[in-house]
Amino acid sequence: MKPINDRVVVKAAPAEEKTSGGIIIPDTAKEKPQRGEVIAVGPGKDGIAMTVSVGDAVLYGKYAGQEVTLEGTDYLIMREDDILVIV
Amino acid sequence: MKPINDRVVVKAAPAEEKTSGGIIIPDTAKEKPQRGEVIAVGPGKDGIAMTVSVGDAVLYGKYAGQEVTLEGTDYLIMREDDILVIV
Amino acid sequence: MKPINDRVVVKAAPAEEKTSGGIIIPDTAKEKPQRGEVIAVGPGKDGIAMTVSVGDAVLYGKYAGQEVTLEGTDYLIMREDDILVIV
Amino acid sequence: MKPINDRVVVKAAPAEEKTSGGIIIPDTAKEKPQRGEVIAVGPGKDGIAMTVSVGDAVLYGKYAGQEVTLEGTDYLIMREDDILVIV
Amino acid sequence: MKPINDRVVVKAAPAEEKTSGGIIIPDTAKEKPQRGEVIAVGPGKDGIAMTVSVGDAVLYGKYAGQEVTLEGTDYLIMREDDILVIV
Amino acid sequence: MKPINDRVVVKAAPAEEKTSGGIIIPDTAKEKPQRGEVIAVGPGKDGIAMTVSVGDAVLYGKYAGQEVTLEGTDYLIMREDDILVIV
Amino acid sequence: MKPINDRVVVKAAPAEEKTSGGIIIPDTAKEKPQRGEVIAVGPGKDGIAMTVSVGDAVLYGKYAGQEVTLEGTDYLIMREDDILVIV
Protein backbone atom coordinates (compact mmCIF):
# COMPACT_ATOMS: atom_id res chain seq x y z
CA MET A 1 0.00 0.00 0.00
CA LYS A 2 1.24 3.49 -0.91
CA PRO A 3 -0.50 6.13 1.23
CA ILE A 4 -1.35 9.48 -0.37
CA ASN A 5 0.35 12.68 0.90
CA ASP A 6 0.82 12.63 4.70
CA ARG A 7 -1.21 9.51 5.33
CA VAL A 8 0.05 6.55 7.36
CA VAL A 9 -1.25 2.97 7.47
CA VAL A 10 -1.31 1.57 11.01
CA LYS A 11 -2.01 -1.98 12.21
CA ALA A 12 -3.79 -1.61 15.55
CA ALA A 13 -2.47 -3.68 18.44
CA PRO A 14 -5.01 -6.24 19.68
CA ALA A 15 -7.13 -5.06 22.62
CA GLU A 16 -5.64 -7.79 24.89
CA GLU A 17 -2.10 -6.48 24.44
CA LYS A 18 -3.28 -3.07 25.47
CA THR A 19 -4.49 -4.05 28.95
CA SER A 20 -1.93 -6.79 29.80
CA GLY A 21 1.03 -4.92 28.26
CA GLY A 22 2.71 -1.66 29.18
CA ILE A 23 -0.13 0.66 28.27
CA ILE A 24 -3.17 0.97 30.51
CA ILE A 25 -5.94 3.34 29.46
CA PRO A 26 -7.26 5.17 32.58
CA ASP A 27 -11.00 5.39 33.18
CA THR A 28 -11.64 9.08 32.47
CA ALA A 29 -13.79 11.17 30.20
CA LYS A 30 -10.76 12.17 28.10
CA GLU A 31 -10.21 10.72 24.64
CA LYS A 32 -8.13 7.57 25.03
CA PRO A 33 -5.14 7.03 22.71
CA GLN A 34 -4.68 3.68 20.99
CA ARG A 35 -1.51 1.75 20.17
CA GLY A 36 -0.45 0.35 16.80
CA GLU A 37 2.40 -0.37 14.40
CA VAL A 38 3.19 1.67 11.30
CA ILE A 39 2.82 -0.47 8.14
CA ALA A 40 3.17 2.12 5.37
CA VAL A 41 4.07 5.82 5.17
CA GLY A 42 3.12 8.39 2.53
CA PRO A 43 5.65 10.72 0.82
CA GLY A 44 4.51 13.73 2.87
CA LYS A 45 2.33 16.73 1.97
CA ASP A 46 3.49 20.06 0.50
CA GLY A 47 7.13 18.93 0.55
CA ILE A 48 7.26 18.35 4.33
CA ALA A 49 9.13 15.13 5.18
CA MET A 50 7.48 12.44 7.29
CA THR A 51 8.64 11.64 10.82
CA VAL A 52 7.36 8.14 11.41
CA SER A 53 8.86 5.07 9.73
CA VAL A 54 7.56 1.62 8.90
CA GLY A 55 7.79 -0.54 12.01
CA ASP A 56 7.37 2.27 14.57
CA ALA A 57 5.08 1.58 17.51
CA VAL A 58 2.80 4.61 17.84
CA LEU A 59 -0.03 5.98 19.96
CA TYR A 60 -2.90 7.75 18.21
CA GLY A 61 -6.26 9.25 19.13
CA LYS A 62 -9.18 6.86 19.57
CA TYR A 63 -11.16 8.32 16.69
CA ALA A 64 -8.21 8.82 14.34
CA GLY A 65 -8.25 7.31 10.87
CA GLN A 66 -10.48 5.14 8.73
CA GLU A 67 -10.71 1.37 9.02
CA VAL A 68 -10.04 -0.93 6.09
CA THR A 69 -9.58 -4.72 5.85
CA LEU A 70 -7.21 -5.97 3.14
CA GLU A 71 -6.66 -9.70 2.60
CA GLY A 72 -8.05 -10.49 6.03
CA THR A 73 -6.05 -7.94 8.03
CA ASP A 74 -7.48 -4.78 9.63
CA TYR A 75 -5.67 -1.47 9.10
CA LEU A 76 -6.24 2.14 10.02
CA ILE A 77 -5.37 4.89 7.56
CA MET A 78 -4.73 8.26 9.24
CA ARG A 79 -2.77 11.48 8.73
CA GLU A 80 0.66 11.55 10.40
CA ASP A 81 -0.45 14.46 12.56
CA ASP A 82 -3.12 12.19 14.11
CA ILE A 83 -0.24 10.19 15.63
CA LEU A 84 0.72 11.42 19.10
CA VAL A 85 4.05 9.71 19.93
CA ILE A 86 6.40 6.98 18.85
CA VAL A 87 6.80 4.74 21.90
CA MET B 1 -12.25 13.98 -19.31
CA LYS B 2 -9.78 16.58 -18.00
CA PRO B 3 -10.27 17.11 -14.25
CA ILE B 4 -9.81 20.64 -12.87
CA ASN B 5 -6.97 21.36 -10.41
CA ASP B 6 -6.39 18.45 -7.99
CA ARG B 7 -9.44 16.48 -8.99
CA VAL B 8 -9.34 12.81 -9.95
CA VAL B 9 -11.90 10.72 -11.87
CA VAL B 10 -12.35 7.25 -10.34
CA LYS B 11 -14.31 4.26 -11.65
CA ALA B 12 -15.67 2.50 -8.57
CA ALA B 13 -15.11 -1.26 -8.35
CA PRO B 14 -18.39 -3.20 -8.43
CA ALA B 15 -19.76 -4.12 -4.97
CA GLU B 16 -19.31 -7.88 -5.74
CA GLU B 17 -15.58 -7.50 -6.33
CA LYS B 18 -15.28 -5.82 -2.98
CA THR B 19 -16.60 -8.72 -0.88
CA SER B 20 -15.26 -11.64 -2.94
CA GLY B 21 -11.89 -9.99 -3.63
CA GLY B 22 -9.09 -8.95 -1.36
CA ILE B 23 -10.90 -6.15 0.41
CA ILE B 24 -13.46 -6.87 3.10
CA ILE B 25 -15.17 -3.94 4.79
CA PRO B 26 -15.55 -4.70 8.54
CA ASP B 27 -18.91 -4.16 10.23
CA THR B 28 -18.16 -1.10 12.41
CA ALA B 29 -19.47 2.39 12.90
CA LYS B 30 -16.38 3.88 11.23
CA GLU B 31 -16.55 5.34 7.73
CA LYS B 32 -15.79 2.52 5.28
CA PRO B 33 -13.32 3.20 2.43
CA GLN B 34 -14.25 2.15 -1.10
CA ARG B 35 -12.09 0.76 -3.90
CA GLY B 36 -11.78 2.07 -7.43
CA GLU B 37 -9.52 2.68 -10.42
CA VAL B 38 -8.14 6.05 -11.44
CA ILE B 39 -9.44 7.06 -14.90
CA ALA B 40 -8.24 10.68 -15.19
CA VAL B 41 -6.00 12.98 -13.15
CA GLY B 42 -6.00 16.79 -12.97
CA PRO B 43 -2.83 18.91 -13.38
CA GLY B 44 -2.64 19.64 -9.63
CA LYS B 45 -3.52 22.73 -7.59
CA ASP B 46 -1.22 25.67 -6.73
CA GLY B 47 1.70 24.03 -8.57
CA ILE B 48 1.75 20.89 -6.41
CA ALA B 49 2.25 17.76 -8.53
CA MET B 50 -0.22 14.89 -8.35
CA THR B 51 0.70 11.54 -6.81
CA VAL B 52 -1.82 9.16 -8.34
CA SER B 53 -1.68 8.06 -11.98
CA VAL B 54 -4.22 6.73 -14.43
CA GLY B 55 -4.70 3.01 -13.81
CA ASP B 56 -3.91 3.09 -10.07
CA ALA B 57 -6.18 1.04 -7.81
CA VAL B 58 -7.11 3.29 -4.89
CA LEU B 59 -9.11 3.29 -1.66
CA TYR B 60 -11.16 6.39 -0.83
CA GLY B 61 -13.66 7.47 1.82
CA LYS B 62 -17.25 6.30 1.43
CA TYR B 63 -18.62 9.81 1.02
CA ALA B 64 -15.80 11.13 -1.16
CA GLY B 65 -16.56 12.69 -4.52
CA GLN B 66 -19.53 13.37 -6.72
CA GLU B 67 -21.19 10.78 -8.95
CA VAL B 68 -21.56 11.28 -12.69
CA THR B 69 -22.63 8.94 -15.49
CA LEU B 70 -21.03 9.54 -18.89
CA GLU B 71 -21.98 7.42 -21.91
CA GLY B 72 -23.43 4.74 -19.68
CA THR B 73 -20.52 4.43 -17.23
CA ASP B 74 -20.56 5.64 -13.60
CA TYR B 75 -17.64 7.72 -12.32
CA LEU B 76 -16.72 9.51 -9.13
CA ILE B 77 -14.96 12.87 -9.24
CA MET B 78 -13.00 13.67 -6.07
CA ARG B 79 -9.99 15.64 -4.88
CA GLU B 80 -6.73 13.67 -4.75
CA ASP B 81 -6.54 14.23 -1.00
CA ASP B 82 -9.81 12.27 -0.63
CA ILE B 83 -7.87 9.20 -1.79
CA LEU B 84 -6.36 7.24 1.11
CA VAL B 85 -3.92 4.75 -0.45
CA ILE B 86 -2.82 3.22 -3.71
CA VAL B 87 -3.21 -0.53 -3.23
CA MET C 1 -18.89 39.93 -19.35
CA LYS C 2 -15.54 40.02 -17.53
CA PRO C 3 -15.62 37.76 -14.45
CA ILE C 4 -13.75 38.89 -11.32
CA ASN C 5 -10.74 36.88 -10.07
CA ASP C 6 -11.26 33.11 -10.51
CA ARG C 7 -14.89 33.33 -11.55
CA VAL C 8 -16.29 31.67 -14.67
CA VAL C 9 -19.54 32.33 -16.55
CA VAL C 10 -21.26 29.12 -17.68
CA LYS C 11 -24.28 28.62 -19.91
CA ALA C 12 -26.09 25.57 -18.60
CA ALA C 13 -27.02 22.87 -21.10
CA PRO C 14 -30.80 22.43 -21.44
CA ALA C 15 -32.26 19.63 -19.31
CA GLU C 16 -33.31 17.70 -22.47
CA GLU C 17 -29.74 17.50 -23.76
CA LYS C 18 -28.69 16.03 -20.46
CA THR C 19 -30.93 12.96 -20.58
CA SER C 20 -30.91 12.32 -24.35
CA GLY C 21 -27.20 13.08 -24.73
CA GLY C 22 -24.12 11.38 -23.38
CA ILE C 23 -24.65 12.28 -19.75
CA ILE C 24 -27.20 10.47 -17.63
CA ILE C 25 -27.57 11.51 -14.00
CA PRO C 26 -28.05 8.38 -11.82
CA ASP C 27 -30.85 8.25 -9.26
CA THR C 28 -28.88 8.46 -6.00
CA ALA C 29 -28.70 10.63 -2.91
CA LYS C 30 -25.34 12.09 -4.04
CA GLU C 31 -25.08 15.64 -5.37
CA LYS C 32 -25.58 15.45 -9.14
CA PRO C 33 -23.18 17.38 -11.41
CA GLN C 34 -24.59 19.54 -14.19
CA ARG C 35 -23.28 20.18 -17.69
CA GLY C 36 -22.63 23.54 -19.32
CA GLU C 37 -20.46 25.58 -21.65
CA VAL C 38 -17.90 28.15 -20.54
CA ILE C 39 -18.85 31.63 -21.82
CA ALA C 40 -16.34 33.87 -20.00
CA VAL C 41 -13.29 33.30 -17.78
CA GLY C 42 -11.78 35.61 -15.15
CA PRO C 43 -8.05 36.50 -15.02
CA GLY C 44 -7.43 34.17 -12.03
CA LYS C 45 -6.92 34.87 -8.33
CA ASP C 46 -3.63 35.57 -6.52
CA GLY C 47 -1.67 35.17 -9.77
CA ILE C 48 -2.78 31.59 -10.41
CA ALA C 49 -3.62 31.01 -14.08
CA MET C 50 -7.02 29.65 -15.07
CA THR C 51 -7.42 26.16 -16.53
CA VAL C 52 -10.73 26.35 -18.37
CA SER C 53 -11.20 28.27 -21.61
CA VAL C 54 -14.16 29.84 -23.37
CA GLY C 55 -16.05 27.10 -25.25
CA ASP C 56 -15.11 24.25 -22.90
CA ALA C 57 -17.90 21.82 -22.01
CA VAL C 58 -17.75 21.33 -18.26
CA LEU C 59 -19.44 19.47 -15.42
CA TYR C 60 -20.08 21.32 -12.16
CA GLY C 61 -21.85 20.66 -8.87
CA LYS C 62 -25.62 21.07 -8.78
CA TYR C 63 -25.53 23.93 -6.29
CA ALA C 64 -22.51 25.71 -7.78
CA GLY C 65 -22.73 29.34 -8.78
CA GLN C 66 -25.28 32.12 -8.88
CA GLU C 67 -27.90 32.48 -11.58
CA VAL C 68 -28.24 35.63 -13.67
CA THR C 69 -30.25 36.42 -16.80
CA LEU C 70 -28.69 38.91 -19.21
CA GLU C 71 -30.53 39.98 -22.38
CA GLY C 72 -32.81 36.98 -22.18
CA THR C 73 -30.15 34.31 -21.64
CA ASP C 74 -29.55 32.41 -18.36
CA TYR C 75 -26.00 32.13 -17.02
CA LEU C 76 -24.32 30.72 -13.96
CA ILE C 77 -21.39 32.53 -12.38
CA MET C 78 -19.15 30.24 -10.30
CA ARG C 79 -15.55 29.93 -9.13
CA GLU C 80 -13.33 27.78 -11.40
CA ASP C 81 -12.77 25.36 -8.52
CA ASP C 82 -16.53 24.62 -8.53
CA ILE C 83 -16.00 23.04 -11.97
CA LEU C 84 -15.26 19.30 -11.78
CA VAL C 85 -14.04 18.26 -15.25
CA ILE C 86 -13.77 19.41 -18.82
CA VAL C 87 -15.57 16.75 -20.87
CA MET D 1 -14.52 58.20 -0.37
CA LYS D 2 -11.35 56.11 -0.09
CA PRO D 3 -12.22 52.45 0.60
CA ILE D 4 -9.94 50.44 2.91
CA ASN D 5 -7.96 47.48 1.53
CA ASP D 6 -9.97 45.51 -1.07
CA ARG D 7 -13.25 47.31 -0.51
CA VAL D 8 -15.31 48.84 -3.31
CA VAL D 9 -18.10 51.45 -3.13
CA VAL D 10 -21.00 50.63 -5.45
CA LYS D 11 -24.06 52.70 -6.37
CA ALA D 12 -26.89 50.23 -6.86
CA ALA D 13 -28.93 50.54 -10.05
CA PRO D 14 -32.59 51.43 -9.34
CA ALA D 15 -34.94 48.46 -9.23
CA GLU D 16 -36.83 49.74 -12.33
CA GLU D 17 -33.72 49.69 -14.48
CA LYS D 18 -33.16 46.11 -13.49
CA THR D 19 -36.43 44.78 -14.89
CA SER D 20 -36.86 47.06 -17.92
CA GLY D 21 -33.15 46.93 -18.86
CA GLY D 22 -31.00 44.11 -20.04
CA ILE D 23 -30.95 42.16 -16.82
CA ILE D 24 -33.93 40.08 -15.74
CA ILE D 25 -33.68 38.16 -12.47
CA PRO D 26 -35.25 34.70 -12.90
CA ASP D 27 -37.76 33.43 -10.34
CA THR D 28 -35.73 30.72 -8.64
CA ALA D 29 -34.56 29.80 -5.15
CA LYS D 30 -30.97 30.76 -6.03
CA GLU D 31 -29.39 33.96 -4.66
CA LYS D 32 -30.09 36.70 -7.20
CA PRO D 33 -27.22 39.01 -8.23
CA GLN D 34 -27.77 42.77 -8.26
CA ARG D 35 -26.45 45.41 -10.65
CA GLY D 36 -24.58 48.58 -9.79
CA GLU D 37 -21.86 51.05 -10.77
CA VAL D 38 -18.44 51.24 -9.12
CA ILE D 39 -17.95 54.64 -7.43
CA ALA D 40 -14.69 54.13 -5.52
CA VAL D 41 -12.04 51.40 -5.34
CA GLY D 42 -9.62 50.60 -2.48
CA PRO D 43 -5.85 50.13 -2.99
CA GLY D 44 -6.09 46.32 -2.64
CA LYS D 45 -5.20 43.98 0.23
CA ASP D 46 -1.85 42.30 0.88
CA GLY D 47 -0.33 43.89 -2.24
CA ILE D 48 -2.82 42.33 -4.67
CA ALA D 49 -3.96 44.83 -7.32
CA MET D 50 -7.64 45.53 -7.83
CA THR D 51 -9.48 44.46 -10.99
CA VAL D 52 -12.51 46.73 -11.06
CA SER D 53 -12.29 50.43 -11.90
CA VAL D 54 -14.45 53.46 -11.16
CA GLY D 55 -17.35 53.52 -13.61
CA ASP D 56 -17.56 49.77 -14.18
CA ALA D 57 -21.05 48.26 -14.26
CA VAL D 58 -20.95 45.19 -12.04
CA LEU D 59 -23.13 42.35 -10.79
CA TYR D 60 -22.84 41.33 -7.13
CA GLY D 61 -24.57 38.96 -4.73
CA LYS D 62 -27.87 40.10 -3.23
CA TYR D 63 -26.54 40.11 0.32
CA ALA D 64 -23.13 41.59 -0.49
CA GLY D 65 -21.90 44.72 1.26
CA GLN D 66 -23.12 47.22 3.81
CA GLU D 67 -25.49 50.07 3.01
CA VAL D 68 -24.60 53.68 3.73
CA THR D 69 -26.25 56.97 2.71
CA LEU D 70 -23.91 59.93 2.16
CA GLU D 71 -25.29 63.34 1.25
CA GLY D 72 -28.58 61.85 0.17
CA THR D 73 -27.20 59.06 -2.02
CA ASP D 74 -27.29 55.33 -1.17
CA TYR D 75 -24.11 53.29 -1.57
CA LEU D 76 -23.02 49.75 -0.90
CA ILE D 77 -19.54 49.03 0.46
CA MET D 78 -18.32 45.50 -0.31
CA ARG D 79 -15.11 43.54 -0.87
CA GLU D 80 -14.04 43.23 -4.52
CA ASP D 81 -14.40 39.46 -4.31
CA ASP D 82 -18.14 39.94 -3.61
CA ILE D 83 -18.42 41.28 -7.17
CA LEU D 84 -19.22 38.57 -9.72
CA VAL D 85 -18.66 40.13 -13.16
CA ILE D 86 -18.11 43.39 -14.95
CA VAL D 87 -20.89 43.61 -17.53
CA MET E 1 -2.59 55.21 23.35
CA LYS E 2 -0.51 52.82 21.25
CA PRO E 3 -2.74 50.19 19.58
CA ILE E 4 -1.39 46.65 19.17
CA ASN E 5 -0.79 45.23 15.66
CA ASP E 6 -3.47 46.37 13.20
CA ARG E 7 -5.76 47.98 15.75
CA VAL E 8 -7.12 51.50 15.44
CA VAL E 9 -8.63 53.76 18.11
CA VAL E 10 -11.68 55.65 16.85
CA LYS E 11 -13.68 58.43 18.51
CA ALA E 12 -17.28 57.91 17.44
CA ALA E 13 -19.12 60.93 16.06
CA PRO E 14 -22.08 61.92 18.25
CA ALA E 15 -25.43 60.51 17.15
CA GLU E 16 -26.78 64.04 16.41
CA GLU E 17 -24.05 64.78 13.88
CA LYS E 18 -24.95 61.59 12.09
CA THR E 19 -28.55 62.54 11.31
CA SER E 20 -28.15 66.32 10.80
CA GLY E 21 -24.82 66.00 8.93
CA GLY E 22 -23.99 64.45 5.63
CA ILE E 23 -24.61 60.87 6.60
CA ILE E 24 -28.14 59.49 6.93
CA ILE E 25 -28.53 55.85 7.88
CA PRO E 26 -31.38 54.31 5.83
CA ASP E 27 -34.07 52.27 7.60
CA THR E 28 -33.26 48.78 6.37
CA ALA E 29 -32.41 45.40 7.81
CA LYS E 30 -28.78 45.73 6.67
CA GLU E 31 -26.00 46.43 9.17
CA LYS E 32 -25.62 50.21 9.42
CA PRO E 33 -22.12 51.71 9.30
CA GLN E 34 -21.10 54.32 11.89
CA ARG E 35 -18.92 57.41 11.53
CA GLY E 36 -15.92 58.37 13.64
CA GLU E 37 -12.48 59.95 13.73
CA VAL E 38 -9.21 58.02 13.94
CA ILE E 39 -7.35 58.87 17.18
CA ALA E 40 -4.51 56.33 17.17
CA VAL E 41 -3.16 53.75 14.70
CA GLY E 42 -1.16 50.57 15.43
CA PRO E 43 2.08 49.66 13.62
CA GLY E 44 0.36 47.03 11.45
CA LYS E 45 0.32 43.23 11.64
CA ASP E 46 2.74 40.80 9.97
CA GLY E 47 4.67 43.69 8.36
CA ILE E 48 1.70 45.06 6.41
CA ALA E 49 1.57 48.88 6.56
CA MET E 50 -1.55 50.64 7.80
CA THR E 51 -3.77 52.68 5.47
CA VAL E 52 -5.65 54.99 7.83
CA SER E 53 -3.99 57.92 9.59
CA VAL E 54 -4.74 59.88 12.74
CA GLY E 55 -7.43 62.47 11.97
CA ASP E 56 -9.15 60.48 9.19
CA ALA E 57 -12.95 60.46 9.23
CA VAL E 58 -14.02 56.85 8.74
CA LEU E 59 -17.12 54.68 8.44
CA TYR E 60 -17.14 51.32 10.21
CA GLY E 61 -19.60 48.50 10.86
CA LYS E 62 -22.12 48.99 13.65
CA TYR E 63 -20.78 46.10 15.70
CA ALA E 64 -17.10 46.78 15.05
CA GLY E 65 -14.68 47.20 17.92
CA GLN E 66 -14.73 47.32 21.69
CA GLU E 67 -15.77 50.35 23.73
CA VAL E 68 -13.51 51.94 26.30
CA THR E 69 -13.73 55.22 28.25
CA LEU E 70 -10.42 56.90 29.08
CA GLU E 71 -10.33 60.12 31.12
CA GLY E 72 -13.98 60.80 30.40
CA THR E 73 -13.90 60.21 26.62
CA ASP E 74 -15.43 57.22 24.82
CA TYR E 75 -13.36 55.37 22.24
CA LEU E 76 -13.76 52.32 20.04
CA ILE E 77 -10.82 49.99 19.46
CA MET E 78 -11.13 47.95 16.26
CA ARG E 79 -8.97 46.26 13.61
CA GLU E 80 -8.22 48.41 10.54
CA ASP E 81 -10.06 45.93 8.34
CA ASP E 82 -13.26 46.68 10.29
CA ILE E 83 -13.11 50.18 8.78
CA LEU E 84 -15.01 50.47 5.50
CA VAL E 85 -13.99 53.80 3.97
CA ILE E 86 -12.23 57.06 4.67
CA VAL E 87 -14.77 59.79 3.89
CA MET F 1 7.65 33.02 34.27
CA LYS F 2 8.60 32.51 30.62
CA PRO F 3 5.48 32.62 28.38
CA ILE F 4 5.33 30.32 25.34
CA ASN F 5 5.27 31.81 21.82
CA ASP F 6 3.18 35.01 21.68
CA ARG F 7 1.76 34.76 25.17
CA VAL F 8 1.89 37.59 27.70
CA VAL F 9 1.44 37.47 31.49
CA VAL F 10 -0.64 40.38 32.78
CA LYS F 11 -1.36 41.46 36.36
CA ALA F 12 -4.89 42.86 36.34
CA ALA F 13 -5.40 46.26 37.94
CA PRO F 14 -7.69 46.08 40.99
CA ALA F 15 -11.34 46.85 40.28
CA GLU F 16 -11.20 50.00 42.50
CA GLU F 17 -8.46 51.59 40.40
CA LYS F 18 -10.57 51.06 37.34
CA THR F 19 -13.52 53.20 38.48
CA SER F 20 -11.65 55.89 40.51
CA GLY F 21 -8.76 56.17 38.01
CA GLY F 22 -8.67 57.37 34.47
CA ILE F 23 -10.64 54.54 32.95
CA ILE F 24 -14.41 54.32 33.34
CA ILE F 25 -16.20 51.38 31.72
CA PRO F 26 -19.50 52.60 30.20
CA ASP F 27 -22.70 50.69 30.89
CA THR F 28 -23.37 49.13 27.52
CA ALA F 29 -23.90 45.71 26.04
CA LYS F 30 -20.47 45.80 24.35
CA GLU F 31 -17.57 43.74 25.68
CA LYS F 32 -15.73 45.87 28.26
CA PRO F 33 -11.93 46.02 28.10
CA GLN F 34 -9.91 45.57 31.30
CA ARG F 35 -6.69 47.23 32.43
CA GLY F 36 -3.52 45.55 33.62
CA GLU F 37 0.27 45.61 33.70
CA VAL F 38 2.51 43.37 31.60
CA ILE F 39 4.61 41.10 33.86
CA ALA F 40 6.23 38.74 31.33
CA VAL F 41 6.41 38.54 27.51
CA GLY F 42 7.01 35.47 25.30
CA PRO F 43 9.61 35.37 22.49
CA GLY F 44 6.94 35.72 19.77
CA LYS F 45 5.40 33.18 17.38
CA ASP F 46 6.64 32.21 13.89
CA GLY F 47 9.52 34.69 14.14
CA ILE F 48 7.29 37.76 14.59
CA ALA F 49 8.67 40.11 17.26
CA MET F 50 6.52 41.16 20.22
CA THR F 51 5.25 44.71 20.61
CA VAL F 52 4.48 44.95 24.33
CA SER F 53 7.19 45.13 26.99
CA VAL F 54 7.32 44.28 30.69
CA GLY F 55 5.86 47.17 32.65
CA ASP F 56 3.44 48.38 29.94
CA ALA F 57 -0.07 49.31 31.08
CA VAL F 58 -2.47 47.64 28.67
CA LEU F 59 -6.18 47.25 27.96
CA TYR F 60 -7.49 43.83 26.97
CA GLY F 61 -10.84 42.20 26.30
CA LYS F 62 -12.90 41.14 29.30
CA TYR F 63 -12.79 37.46 28.40
CA ALA F 64 -9.15 37.41 27.28
CA GLY F 65 -6.70 34.99 28.82
CA GLN F 66 -6.63 32.33 31.50
CA GLU F 67 -6.36 33.06 35.21
CA VAL F 68 -3.61 31.60 37.36
CA THR F 69 -2.48 32.32 40.95
CA LEU F 70 1.22 31.92 41.64
CA GLU F 71 2.60 32.46 45.16
CA GLY F 72 -0.47 34.38 46.21
CA THR F 73 -0.70 36.73 43.19
CA ASP F 74 -3.33 36.54 40.42
CA TYR F 75 -2.20 36.70 36.80
CA LEU F 76 -3.80 36.46 33.39
CA ILE F 77 -2.03 34.64 30.57
CA MET F 78 -3.17 35.75 27.11
CA ARG F 79 -1.90 36.04 23.52
CA GLU F 80 -0.43 39.45 22.62
CA ASP F 81 -3.14 39.91 20.00
CA ASP F 82 -5.74 39.81 22.81
CA ILE F 83 -4.25 43.10 24.03
CA LEU F 84 -5.97 46.14 22.51
CA VAL F 85 -3.75 49.13 23.35
CA ILE F 86 -0.83 50.24 25.46
CA VAL F 87 -2.12 53.22 27.48
CA MET G 1 8.68 8.43 23.83
CA LYS G 2 9.28 10.54 20.72
CA PRO G 3 6.39 12.99 20.21
CA ILE G 4 5.28 13.78 16.64
CA ASN G 5 5.72 17.31 15.25
CA ASP G 6 5.03 19.98 17.91
CA ARG G 7 3.71 17.61 20.54
CA VAL G 8 4.97 17.53 24.12
CA VAL G 9 4.61 14.80 26.76
CA VAL G 10 3.84 16.23 30.20
CA LYS G 11 3.68 14.49 33.59
CA ALA G 12 0.96 16.27 35.54
CA ALA G 13 1.85 17.38 39.08
CA PRO G 14 -0.27 15.62 41.72
CA ALA G 15 -3.36 17.55 42.82
CA GLU G 16 -1.99 17.90 46.39
CA GLU G 17 1.11 19.78 45.20
CA LYS G 18 -1.10 22.21 43.41
CA THR G 19 -2.97 23.45 46.50
CA SER G 20 -0.15 23.19 49.13
CA GLY G 21 2.56 24.49 46.76
CA GLY G 22 3.06 27.84 45.11
CA ILE G 23 0.12 27.64 42.73
CA ILE G 24 -3.43 28.19 43.98
CA ILE G 25 -6.24 27.95 41.45
CA PRO G 26 -8.82 30.69 42.19
CA ASP G 27 -12.50 29.80 42.35
CA THR G 28 -13.80 31.44 39.19
CA ALA G 29 -15.65 30.47 36.05
CA LYS G 30 -12.47 30.86 33.96
CA GLU G 31 -10.58 27.84 32.65
CA LYS G 32 -8.02 26.85 35.28
CA PRO G 33 -4.46 26.07 34.14
CA GLN G 34 -2.72 22.94 35.42
CA ARG G 35 0.93 22.37 36.36
CA GLY G 36 3.21 19.64 35.08
CA GLU G 37 6.73 18.66 34.05
CA VAL G 38 7.88 18.21 30.46
CA ILE G 39 9.00 14.59 29.86
CA ALA G 40 9.52 14.54 26.07
CA VAL G 41 9.51 17.14 23.28
CA GLY G 42 8.83 16.66 19.55
CA PRO G 43 11.11 18.01 16.79
CA GLY G 44 8.71 20.88 15.96
CA LYS G 45 6.25 21.38 13.09
CA ASP G 46 6.94 22.99 9.69
CA GLY G 47 10.57 23.67 10.66
CA ILE G 48 9.72 25.85 13.68
CA ALA G 49 11.96 25.05 16.65
CA MET G 50 10.46 24.09 20.00
CA THR G 51 10.68 26.38 23.04
CA VAL G 52 10.15 24.02 25.97
CA SER G 53 12.77 21.50 27.09
CA VAL G 54 12.65 18.25 29.01
CA GLY G 55 12.46 19.01 32.72
CA ASP G 56 10.65 22.36 32.39
CA ALA G 57 7.82 23.00 34.83
CA VAL G 58 4.89 24.30 32.79
CA LEU G 59 1.32 25.52 33.16
CA TYR G 60 -1.24 24.39 30.59
CA GLY G 61 -4.99 24.68 30.03
CA LYS G 62 -7.24 22.33 32.00
CA TYR G 63 -8.57 20.62 28.90
CA ALA G 64 -5.27 20.49 27.02
CA GLY G 65 -3.91 17.20 25.72
CA GLN G 66 -4.83 13.54 25.74
CA GLU G 67 -4.22 11.22 28.69
CA VAL G 68 -2.18 8.05 28.36
CA THR G 69 -0.79 5.61 30.97
CA LEU G 70 2.51 3.91 30.09
CA GLU G 71 4.07 1.36 32.45
CA GLY G 72 1.98 2.58 35.33
CA THR G 73 2.61 6.32 34.91
CA ASP G 74 0.05 8.88 33.67
CA TYR G 75 1.08 11.35 30.96
CA LEU G 76 -0.56 14.08 28.95
CA ILE G 77 0.29 14.54 25.27
CA MET G 78 -0.40 18.06 24.01
CA ARG G 79 0.79 20.54 21.37
CA GLU G 80 3.45 22.99 22.59
CA ASP G 81 1.08 25.88 21.92
CA ASP G 82 -1.30 24.43 24.55
CA ILE G 83 1.39 25.25 27.14
CA LEU G 84 0.95 28.71 28.63
CA VAL G 85 4.19 29.45 30.53
CA ILE G 86 7.35 27.87 31.86
CA VAL G 87 7.35 28.62 35.59
Image (tube, coloured by chain):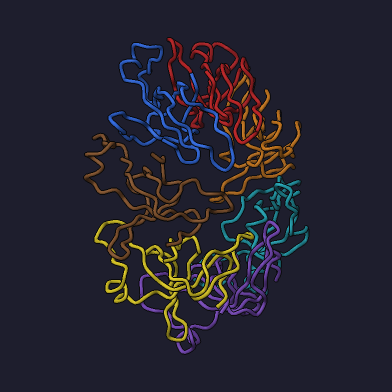
Chain colours: A purple, B cyan, C orange, D red, E blue, F brown, G yellow
Q: Report which quarter residue G24 is drawn in.
A: bottom left
Residue at the (54%, 54%) spot, across then down: F45
* x and y percentages locating residue G37 in the rendered image: 44, 73
Q: What is the quadrant of the N terminus of chain A in the image?
A: bottom right
Q: Describe residue A56's horizontal placement relative to residue E44 as left or right.
A: right
Work out whether residue E5 or residue G34 is closer to the camera in this orientation and state it.
Answer: E5
Q: Residue furthest bottom?
A: A20
* Residue B76 screen position, x and y as percent: 66, 53
C47 sits left or right of F10 in the view: right
Which residue lies at the image location 40% right of the left edge and 28% below the top edge? E10
Q: Nearer the viewer, residue D66 or D4?
A: D4
Where does the image place residue C40, in percent across and percent down from the top left?
70, 28
Name above or below for residue E34 compared with residue B81: above
- Does the rendering let one see residue C67? no
For the residue pair G41 and A36, the one nearer the viewer reads as G41
Residue C41's place in the image compared with B57, above or below, is above
Q: How many marks?
A: 0
Q: Residue at x 50, y 33 (%)?
A: E81
Q: As drawn, which residue projects farthest toward the right? A: B54
Which quadrant of the rendered structure holds the C terminus of chain A? bottom right
